[in-house]
Image (cartoon, rainbow, N blue to C red):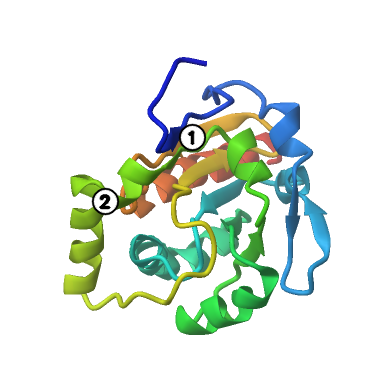
Amino acid sequence: MAPVDAGIVTHVATLLVGQRVPGALAEARVLDRANRPHRLGDSWKGGACVICFLRHFGCTGCSEHVEELSPRLLELSALGVRAVFVGNGEPRFIDGFVARHALEDKRVEVFTDPTLAVFRAAGLLRSAWATFGPRGLADQLRGLSHGLGWGGMKGDQLQQGGSLVVDAGGVLAFAHRSESVGGHARAADLVEVAMRLAASHAAIHV
């Protein structure tokens, strides 16, 4: 691992599109709202899955990502694509997050990992500069200007997010690593990749 400043912990894994998800990530455990553990790799058993890592549950940048993706969640479900959000706050924060973003009927599963182990296994950045540097602050101001309020500190504020699309065989079809608070993947890109996977799956099973 290359030397870095004290405010940054670099990623510990490299995810490559077209290759299988590393075992450490597939075997990583995330918690549901009842504090029950789930194997992340079960998320793509039987079908494609979109996974969005959302930092802490009060994050303004994450709110921006969720608000952008939320209108497409039912569309993903109709295609047979599973949607999973993973935060890093305590499980007790999940209910408030779901209510805040009106996700109750959106066919999305929300998990968390306060240990950050799944974030490390996904090779995601944990960085003070990404949170408090010029780009991170601009991201937060953008979110606030769009009416996305801050939901309080509900997890690790230095951890950054990312997005994956994984096919039913555990092969990575899309990977994005956020470099700042609001540097999330475009919802349109996630949905486009998921649609291609769904179409391919349907063609195979005709």
168 sits to left or right of 197: right
Residue furthest out toward the front: 6
Amino acid type indicated by mark 2: Gly
**Spot occupied by residue 96 in the image (x, y as percentages of width and height):** 56, 82
Q: As shown in the figure, which amino acid type bears the numbered disc 1?
A: Phe
Seen from this angle, which residue lies furthest top?
2
Q: On the image, numbered disc 2 is attached to which residue?
A: 136
Is residue 154 found left or right of 184 in the rendered image? Answer: right
Looking at the rendered structure, the secondary structure element under dot 2 is helix
182, 4: nearer the viewer: 4
Residue 19 in view, yes or no: yes
Label 1 belongs to which residue?
174
x, y percent for residue 26 = 74, 37
Q: Residues within 10 Å of mark 2 (few under 14, many from 20)?
A: many
| Circle 1: element type | strand
Q: Quadrant of the C terminus?
A: top right
How crowded pointer 1 is (Cα within 10 Å; few <14, some 14-19, many 20+) is rated as many
- Asked whether residue 180 appears in the rendered view, the answer is no
Q: Could you tell me which residue is drawn at 29 percent across and 75 percent down? A: 148
Residue 116's place in the image compared with 197, above or below, is below
Q: Is residue 183 left or right of residue 147?
A: right
Q: Nearer the viewer, residue 165 or 129?
A: 129
Q: Image point 73% across, 66% down: which residue?
A: 32
Q: Compare residues 82 and 155 and report the one nearer the observer.
A: 155
